[in-house]
């Protein structure tokens, strides 16, 4: 068994790759287009031609695919073998035998591996580093891989204080529960996450409108149900405030270019930095 599989068996880690494999079954051209649009908008670039793009914790591989379609030379890596397999499947479908997209199984906590990758024009790590079990070390490993003048785009779970501690308890309970019984944790959490929104939509005479909009407009390509499973199961789990992330990267020679918060609530804060030359 790999270290990842051992951690999953112990209930210490969620099987992210299994969730991503199910996501690939619903991947559409529309979702790929939305991923491309998201990259262009947040990076303020119309094209990635001639740029080196690092996807640190590539998950499904969707954004690696989007970056490659925008012209970048892409290197993807992930700790979860099943996630690596997802990215490889996307490469097989859209860029078979393409030397400008490489995919590896590796950990962002492997200091030597990160150093040997060198520097990139764009370093992208969305919703990943808070799942490593050592978030600040992961952030410290990722930052130097953005070259001077390059961009670093991260997304990290928002620190909600006591609320984050409660969700951590839910995640631990989910992963410690036998698979056949996990619905006992998942369904109450699903009702907590989607119940109020569903009721509001019904009262406004537009039942399931938010659910349908989420499916069609989510830039991550995630369907609502898969997103709930990912959220409830997502362990390890760490959080940070935008202020803490800003200070951490300012001390390392980065300047904040774009900030998109989740409004102090549930979800990720996205920050795009440029590395000073």
Image (cartoon, grey):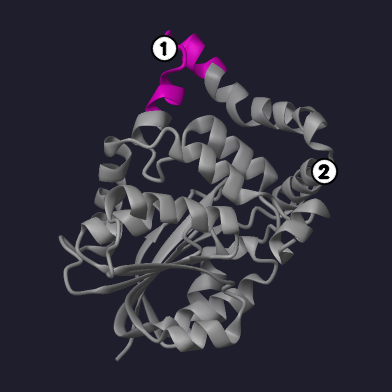
Residue 219: image tag: none
Residue 18 in picture, x, y percent from top left: 60, 44
| Magenta region includes residue 201 | yes
Residue 4 in picture, x, y percent from top left: 70, 61
For the question of whether residue 166 can be seen, the reply is yes
- Vertical placement of 137 versus 129: above or below? below
| Residue on which the image places disc 2 | 173
Which residue range is magenta in the image?
199-213
- Vertical placement of 231 versus 142: above or below? above
Residue lying at 34% horizontally and 80% vertically, measured from the top left: 120
- Vertical placement of 17 versus 119: above or below? above
Q: Main secondary structure of the magenta part?
A: helix
| Magenta region includes residue 179 | no
Q: Picture quarter containing residue 260?
A: bottom left
Residue lying at 27% horizontally and 56% vertically, measured from the top left: 95
Q: Disc 1 on helix, strand or loop?
A: loop
Which of 214 and 64 lies nearest the eye of the viewer?
A: 64
Residue 252 in picture, x, y percent from top left: 47, 87
Residues at marks 2 and 1, CA–CA distance in whole angstroms:
34 Å
Which of 62 and 158 lies nearest the eye of the viewer?
A: 62
- Please give left or right for residue 5 compared with residue 245 in the image: right
């Amino acid at each position: 068994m790999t270290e990842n599989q051992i951690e999953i068996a112990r209930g210490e880690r969620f099987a992210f790759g299994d969730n991503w494999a199910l996501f690939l079954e619903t991947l559409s051209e529309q979702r790929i287009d939305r991923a491309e649009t998201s990259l262009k908008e947040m990076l303020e670039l119309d094209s990635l031609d001639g740029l080196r793009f690092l996807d640190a914790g590539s998950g499904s591989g969707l954004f690696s695919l989007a970056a490659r379609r925008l012209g970048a030379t892409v290197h993807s890596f992930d700790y979860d073998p099943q996630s690596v397999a997802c990215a490889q499947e996307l490469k097989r479908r859209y860029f078979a035998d393409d030397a400008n997209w490489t995919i590896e199984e590796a950990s962002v906590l492997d200091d030597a591996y990160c150093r040997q990758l060198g520097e990139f024009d764009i370093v992208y790590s969305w919703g990943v580093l808070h799942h490593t079990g050592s978030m600040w070390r992961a952030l410290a490993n990722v930052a130097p891989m953005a070259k001077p003048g390059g961009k670093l785009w991260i997304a990290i779970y928002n620190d909600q204080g006591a609320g984050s501690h409660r969700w951590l308890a839910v995640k631990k309970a989910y992963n410690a529960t036998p698979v056949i019984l996990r619905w006992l944790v998942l369904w109450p959490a699903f009702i907590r996450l989607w119940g109020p929104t569903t009721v509001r939509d019904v009262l406004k005479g537009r039942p399931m409108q938010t659910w349908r909009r989420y499916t069609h407009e989510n830039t991550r390509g995630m369907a609502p149900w898969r997103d709930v499973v990912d959220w409830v199961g997502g362990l390890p789990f760490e959080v940070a405030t935008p202020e803490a992330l800003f200070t951490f990267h300012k001390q390392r020679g980065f300047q904040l270019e774009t900030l998109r918060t989740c409004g102090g609530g549930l979800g990720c804060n996205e920050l795009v930095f440029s590395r000073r030359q």
